[in-house]
Image (tube, rainbow, N blue to C red):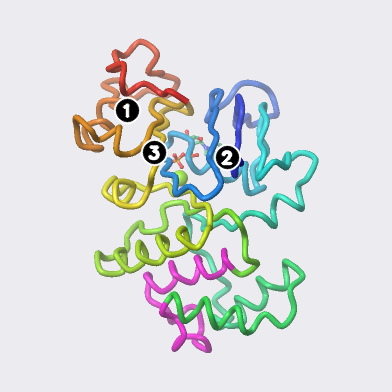
Amino acid sequence: MQSAIKVENLHKTYAPNGGNKGTHALRGLDLDIKKGEFFALLGPNGSGKTTFINILAGPTLKSKGKVEILGSDIDTHRVKTKFLLGVVPQEISFDSFFTVNEILELQSGYYGIRNNGKHIDEILSKLGLKEKKFTNSRALSGGMKRRLLIAKALIHKPEVLILDEPTAGVDVELRRSMWKYMKQLNEEGLTILLTTHYLEEAEQLCSRTAIIHNGKLVALDKTSELTKEKTLEDVFVELTYESDTGSGTTTDTKPISPNKRANG
Ligand code: ADP
Ligand code: MG
């Protein structure tokens, strides 16, 4: 099966002066997410999830390693791979002078798409934002803003959608409606990479789950396999718990039951 996102030996060090001292946020990550998958990337705060996503999407430069999006290397096909990805960022930020429609038209413009009105309407009605089309973005509720971020990410019809904690701080009802929508998108063929702190979300939606900790993969398996003997929460806590939370610690010496080891 074709790979949608393939990374090999990915490293990122945030070094203040360009040296090699600094935060080693990713430490040799290998992942192969297949086309059509709904894939969960879990990990505690600071484990490197957003760094990983920002390397895929562009704003962060990797220190070492190889990244391919649908077979195209991001180093040699930067523009092409940007078009293949839609990214819902962790932080909400809109220009508060614009309406929902203006934001989506501007976003279309970034991708060189004119007359995107029909697609904009489709997305807005699917996301339950149709009535807000001409509303100023600052007048939207938190949940609506989250949905607008998804609409923005889908504006150029990407093949891979990456969601960085899309349901953080979203109420239960809206979270469930977002799940339904993400599920539908995946069933229509979109590959989805989801990071979340709601483990239930990964269990309900994602066929495979990876857990990272201190920038390293500590588990990778079918979600149903990971949750065979224990809840995902128990697995997660077991693999990521640190009595000493000082930076630079690794899980290398920690006993991990063999069937929970990363097998990717
Ligand atoms: P997560 O999304 O899993 O919470 P991040 O990727 O945001 O993790 O962070 C991973 C590590 O990299 C953390 O130690 C964080 O402090 C550090 N980090 C993230 N962004 C930067 C940055 N721009 N400059 C320096 N360090 C950063
Ligand atoms: Mg993050």
Q: Residue at x 36, y 59 (%)?
A: 167
> Could you tell me which secondary element the residue under label 2 belongs to?
loop
- Towards the viewer: 94 or 18: 94
Q: Residue at x 37, y 76 (%)?
A: 141
Is 44 in the magenta?
no
Q: Tell me the residue that label 3 is attached to.
A: 209
Q: Residue at x 58, y 79 (%)?
A: 120
The span from disc 2 to disc 3 (Cα, nearest Å) is: 18 Å
Q: Residues within 10 Å of mark 3 (few under 14, many from 20)?
A: many
Q: Tell me the residue that label 2 is attached to.
A: 1
Q: Tell me the residue that label 1 is attached to.
A: 240
Which of pointers 2 and 1 indicates the residue nearer the eye?
2
Q: Which amino acid, by three-letter code, is at mark 3?
A: Thr
Residue 1, how many percent across, how many down? 57, 40
Residue 87, how many percent across, how many down? 56, 56
The span from disc 2 to disc 1 (Cα, nearest Å) is: 31 Å
Q: Residue at x 62, y 65 (%)?
A: 157
The span from disc 3 to disc 1 (Cα, nearest Å) is: 14 Å
> Could you tell me which secondary element the residue under label 3 belongs to?
strand
Residue 24, how many percent across, how many down? 54, 26
Residue 166 left/right relative to 97: left
N-term mark: 2 or 3: 2
- Towards the viewer: 263 or 117: 263
Residue 12, how many percent across, how many down? 60, 30
Outermost residue on the right side: it is: 76
Q: Which amino acid, by three-letter code, is at mark 1?
A: Thr
Residue 222 left/right relative to 76: left
Which of pointers 2 and 3 indicates the residue nearer the eye?
2
Which of pointers 3 and 1 indicates the residue nearer the eye?
3
Q: What stretch of residues is rendered in magenta?
A: 128-154
